[in-house]
Image (cartoon, rainbow, N blue to C red):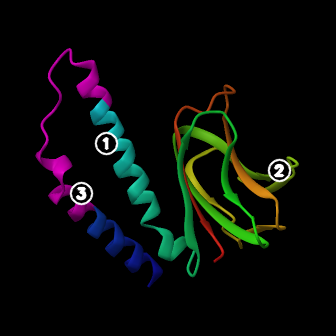
Amino acid sequence: MREAWSFALLALICIAVARGPLACAGPPPAGDARGASEAASAREDASLAALAARGSFVAPGMRESSRLRSTAEKVVVARARDRDACVRVAFEASAPVLAKLVDRGGNVLASLDAPATGGILGARGPVCVRRGDSVSAVAAGSDGGAGSVRWVAWQSP
């Protein structure tokens, strides 16, 4: 049953993207670097939106806290400002990476067992931090770099 919901969601996303403005836009003119950059940015935005659309399945009952892009740097995906917070994070990468979530002190909260181009951190249950702490995402490729990584985080309300 869960596979049917995932397939239905994927079909809806494909239909929405096909009917959206991206489907009407032609390729950028040859030699137009700005047009190519804008097209790449639009693809990145669509990819982040598709990743975020998984929220109801990945993190039911949680609210989206961030949508980010990174390379090999550590990025803060959630902050526990006024109270303790629990987080789940989905990611997609341009090349296989070892992804992990760490707290402010660098302690590993969740990680992948093997390099992957996508996945969910905190899949077995959300990772939690105390009030005043933060959760950061880090990805490293086999060559030390990470290419382009897109992150979407959901946090307990």
Give the quarter of the image for residue 43. Answer: top left
Helix, strand or loop for disc 3: helix
* Crowd rating for badge 2 (residues with CA inside 10 Å; few <14, some 14–19, many 20+): some
Amino acid bearing label 3: Val
Residue 110 can be seen in this image: no
Residues in magenta? 14-37
Residue tagged 2: 104
Q: Earlier in the sequence, mark 1 or mark 3?
A: 3
Residue 81, image x, y percentages: 75, 64
Amino acid bearing label 2: Arg
The Cα–Cα distance between marks 1 and 2, rounded to whole angstroms, is 32 Å
Helix, strand or loop for disc 1: helix
Residue tagged 1: 42
Residue 122 can be seen in this image: yes
Amino acid bearing label 1: Ala
Residue tagged 3: 17
Residue that appears at 67% across and 31% down: 142
Q: Earlier in the sequence, mark 1 or mark 2?
A: 1
